[in-house]
Image (cartoon, coloured by chain):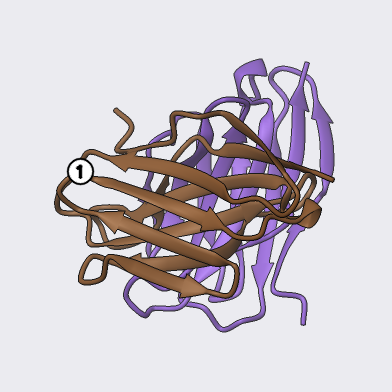
Chain colours: A brown, B purple
Amino acid sequence: DQQVKQNSPSLSVQEGRISILNCDYTNSMFDYFLWYKKYPAEGPTFLISISSIKDKNEDGRFTVFLNKSAKHLSLHIVPSQPGDSAVYFCAAPRDSGYALNFGKGTSLLVTP
Amino acid sequence: NAGVTQTPKFQVLKTGQSMTLQCAQDMNHNSMYWYRQDPGMGLRLIYYSASEGTTDKGEVPNGYNVSRLNKREFSLRLESAAPSQTSVYFCASSSAAAYSPLHFGNGTRLTVT
């Protein structure tokens, strides 16, 4: 049973607009979340994280929002650029404290 | 700065053959991981090693074995490859700090015919 869910397999956005990628989780004990970005033929790279004591974390064009009551987080990219085209994975630490549970990913395409 | 290095990058096996995927990290990380990525399935944990000398199963360990050879190296072995093991395999490492991000290699693309 997947504990981290990304229900949108793909998203297409125009350059300069906002991209919003969504993630839901089932385990209310999760207290830390991460987003990874993956280009074709490369490994995933860490993008941004958020602790459950916050509801927002910002890093440049990337902002993650956490809504604990809804068990939902989102990644906002503003403004979107063609180089942001990649697969984005939402993740949360496993019960063991080691390794991560990943969502299935959302493929973002930013068109010029 | 190499980070996490995986070899080989590509491999084709016949059903029943065996092989070992190699992974090495140069970041002095304590923990290492093996994931597989399949279309529509995201990244699934096969095995992990929290520290040198320990290994534990992840969500999809069947058909695989691992060895934490030393702090730097963590290998994944397929004893008798099956077509269901066709996938892209990623090795990752992380420091011992709680919730520290994982650093991934660039993957091994394995096809079993």
Residue at x-position 53% and y-position 76%: B71
**B5 relative position to B57: left or right:** right
**Residue for badge 1:** A70
Residue B25 placement: quadrant = bottom right
Residue B5 placement: quadrant = bottom right
**A20 relative position to B87: left or right:** left
Give, as a three-letter code, the residue at label 1.
Ala
Residue at x-position 33% and y-position 32%: A2
Question: Is residue B52 in view?
Answer: no
User: Regarding mark 1 in the picture, which secondary structure is present there?
Assistant: loop
B102 vs A54, nearest the viewer: A54
Q: Residue furthest front?
A: A17
**B92 relative position to B17: left or right:** left
Identify the image quadrant of the C terminus of chain A: top right
A28 vs A53, nearest the viewer: A53
Residue A24 placement: quadrant = top left
